[in-house]
Amino acid sequence: MTSRPVTLGIDLGTTSVKAALLEAAPGHPSGFVVLASCARAAGAETESAAAGPQGREQDVTRIIQALNECLDALPPRQLQRVGAIGVSGQMHGILFWKTGQGCEWTERGSAPVFEPRAVSHLVTWQDNRCNSGFLASLPKPASHLSVATGFGCATIFWLLKNSPEFLKSYDVAGTIQDYVVAMLCGLPRPLMSDQNAASWGYFNTQSQSWNSDILQMAGFPTHLLPDIAEPGSLAGRTSHTWFEIPAGTEVGVALGDLQASVYSCMGQRTDAVLNISTSVQLAASMPVGFQPPQTPDPAAPVAFFPYFDRTYLGVAASLNGGNVLATFVHMLVQWMTDLGLEVEESTVYSRMIQAAAQQKDTHLTITPTVLGERHLPDQLASVTRISSSDLSLGHVTRALCRGIVQNLHSMLPFQQLQEWGVERVVGSGSALSRNEVLKQEVQRAFPFPVCFGQDVDAAFGAALVMLRRDIS
């Protein structure tokens, strides 16, 4: 009897790294079972020398350290059975490295691992160095997707103008997930799926090509742009044994975390997937044959991202999700400190959710857009309808959770979902799974059945793409 294929799924997220081992299980409702999984906080935020306080950068060494810790925690005997690796990660961001010098393979204990070498910081999707004036000065893309701050190509344009010497130090670039795949396979140049390419800007999804002519005319270093490959295809095979995973193991082209997350839990084409983690995404499958508009509309709150098999997802991607709750908690803790009191953030979080759970309704209205939105970059948050009877912690937390959901509704009205044929919402993500009040507000807002608990998991999605590829 041959053992069933085991695939390793990896997700390199904004705040954490996750790895999961999945095995095909034909009799199981989902078609797979999870053998083991592990998550580690990345703790990779670091100062930006070039962009100052507007910069949002992460130390790649720390991200890879968290990845190694995840692999180290998985059962070695199961790792020996891995036949394929799927990788996803945070979209839009960019890092640079030198061909052939991106990493060094070393022994960690008895396990072979790779460690970053001639690599820049990762400039993430949260980066704010490209203000509205700078973005307006860039050439118009030949793409249905507009370009925003934090997008890879916008960051290159900014560096070209503000730190041209920096770019001369490197000759290739990619997202963090493209980097990991390139290092595992020993690729001289990274391969990039259209999912990640579209997230950088200046990529035409219909012709599957970069806007090379437009970029070259603007003096853009197009040699930094990766080659394009189909999501779900192979990038290569591992060039070394990695922990217990044999050399020669298949590795898929890196996926976007949005697409991998949706893939992990969209049971039917009529499902919409709501993911509330650091940020918020509401995604629904577009009908087969759908083609997005030819030109970008920067003011449109819904974007159409490439999915699999040349189909698209309609996505409302809000920048304001669990990070808004975290900002509120941080503010409360800071106030306490100013008052001479010490309290843990975790205590504040659980107490405020308890208080809001007892406060079933409120007239207080919070627009929670402390980070603006890509289609409204200059919008700030606001609190209205304040009365003396609505000032308790329960009122404010209830209004904040409601505001996160209402903000999403303003971006993608739920009537639009009905027109797209949506019949059910699958709710998931770390900020939603541990917040009963947020769940209540989601159920209150949607005119469809909402099911929770099927955790959207990009690591599972990345593994599933490879698992189904092996089986088929």
Image (tube, grey):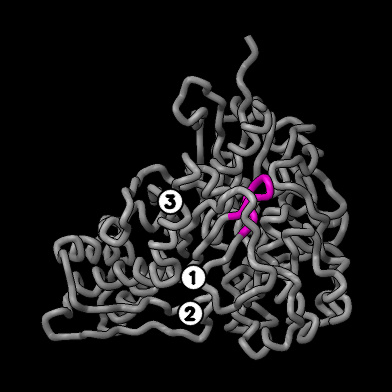
Q: Amino acid at mark 2?
A: Gly
Give the SS element for disc 2.
Answer: loop
Would you call the spot at circle 2 few (<14 residues within 10 Å), some (14-19), or many (20 or more)? some
426 or 387: nearer the viewer: 426
272 or 456: nearer the viewer: 272
Q: CA distance from mark 3 to mark 2?
A: 28 Å
Range of residues picked out in magenta: 305-312
Residue 284 appears left or right of 68? left
Q: Residue at x 71, y 38 (%)?
A: 242
Mark carried by residue 375: none
* Cβ–Cβ under 8 Å for marks 1 and 2: yes
Q: Residue at x 49, y 56 (%)?
A: 283
Q: Is residue 368 above or below residue 469?
A: below
Q: Looking at the picture, how far across and down is residue 128, in whole percent?
A: 59, 80
Q: Which residue is mark 2?
A: 372
Disc nearer the start of the sequence (1/3) = 1
Q: Which residue is mark 3?
A: 422
Residue 142 appears in the figure: yes
Q: Amino acid at mark 3?
A: Val
* Cβ–Cβ under 8 Å for marks 1 and 3: no
Residue reaching furthest to the top: 1
Q: Amino acid at mark 1?
A: Leu
126 or 184: nearer the viewer: 126
Q: Which residue is mark 1?
A: 319
Give the SS element for disc 1.
Answer: loop
Q: CA distance from mark 1 to mark 3?
A: 23 Å
Give the SS element for disc 3.
Answer: loop
